[in-house]
């Protein structure tokens, strides 16, 4: 079986999971952290190299203040509790998103997690926190514009490779497989550039119920897909670029 080098996941459905049990939404987020731990472990075992998970979007600030606060607290707690275990698995934590917009404590824990795990050789875990695809693209454009103004780059050199190199995921392969739990059929501003040719796999399972078996099912179905990248099957790409 071909294992994707990079898997991206929109971890959705925590609130509905909690509501269906008569629990507060934060209980769903808590259970969601446990689901993420299982999936990180499973990805490590499978030999996936990069796992990018959507934990908090630039739009999630629209939620009620108590939920946002609870999510930020949970982030801090989970990082404090889990970093040593992740490190023992060889996981390298990397945050993608606008860290400057996070509460200082959350930002500090993220920085610490990245520093502690920086030398690890295993799975790269990209935590998308205060992440928005449009925000990321605007930032890339801004970075490149600044380099043009500084005379380091010609406007003509702003091409796809230059853009990719100015994203949070610079140097990483694009995700071959993008999973969304809880049955929603949308990207919700996740990895707009990087997911251009990702295979999408939507699961009805709510994120806190997501297990290794669901990940394996996604990878198996990914293997059965035919990826054409705009070309034709069994036809060498001999047309013009
Ligand atoms: C995903 O679960 C977690 C975050 C967005 C932080 P939701 O909180 O969106 O759960 P639902 O979609 O309301 O069920
Ligand atoms: C996407 O889920 C963001 C995360 C999983 C962190 P949302 O629940 O915020 O997405 P929408 O609002 O249903 O599009
Ligand atoms: Mg949701």
Image (tube, rainbow, N blue to C red):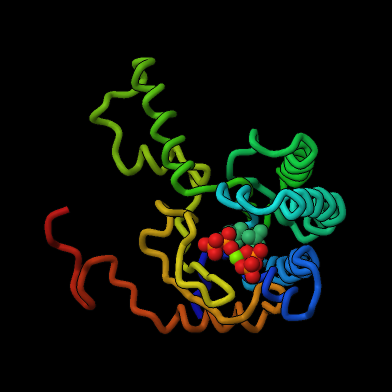
Above-or-below relation of 129 to 205:
above
Q: Quadrant of residue 211?
A: bottom right
In screen coordinates, is 124 left or right of 83? left
Tell me what residue is drawn at x 36 percent, y 37 percent: 162
Above-or-below relation of 100 to 164:
above
Identify the residue at the far left of this view. 239
Q: Which residue is more in the foreground, 162 or 210? A: 210
In screen coordinates, is 129 left or right of 109? left
In screen coordinates, is 178 left or right of 227? right
Q: Position of residue 137 (x, y in %)?
A: 42, 41
Q: Position of residue 9 (x, y in %)?
A: 57, 65
Q: Is residue 145 visible?
A: yes
Tell me what residue is drawn at x 20 percent, y 73 percent: 232
Tell me what residue is drawn at x 42 percent, y 37 percent: 138
Identify the residue at the far top of this view. 150
Q: Which residue is more in the foreground, 25 or 193? A: 25
Q: Quadrant of residue 160?
A: top left
């Amino acid at each position: 079986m071909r294992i994707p080098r990079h898997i991206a996941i929109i971890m959705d459905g925590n609130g509905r999971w909690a509501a269906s049990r008569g629990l507060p939404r934060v209980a769903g987020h808590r259970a969601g952290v446990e689901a993420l731990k299982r999936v990180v472990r499973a990805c490590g075992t499978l030999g996936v190299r990069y796992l990018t998970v959507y934990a908090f979007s630039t739009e999630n600030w629209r939620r009620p203040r108590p939920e946002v606060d609870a999510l930020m607290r949970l982030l801090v707690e989970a990082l404090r509790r889990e970093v040593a275990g992740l490190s023992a698995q060889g996981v390298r934590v990397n945050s993608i998103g606008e860290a400057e917009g996070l509460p200082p404590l959350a930002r500090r824990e993220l920085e610490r997690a990245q520093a502690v795990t920086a030398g690890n050789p295993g799975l790269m875990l990209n935590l998308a926190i205060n992440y928005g695809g449009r925000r990321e693209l605007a930032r890339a454009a801004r970075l490149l514009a600044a380099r043009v103004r500084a005379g380091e780059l010609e406007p003509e050199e702003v091409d796809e490779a230059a853009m990719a190199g100015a994203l949070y995921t610079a140097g990483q392969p694009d995700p071959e497989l993008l999973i969304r739990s809880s049955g929603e059929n949308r990207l919700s501003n996740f990895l707009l550039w990087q997911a251009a040719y990702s295979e999408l796999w939507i699961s009805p399972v709510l994120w806190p119920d997501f297990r290794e078996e669901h990940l394996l099912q996604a990878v198996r179905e990914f293997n059965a897909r035919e990826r054409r990248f705009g070309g034709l099957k069994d036809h060498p790409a001999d047309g013009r670029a």
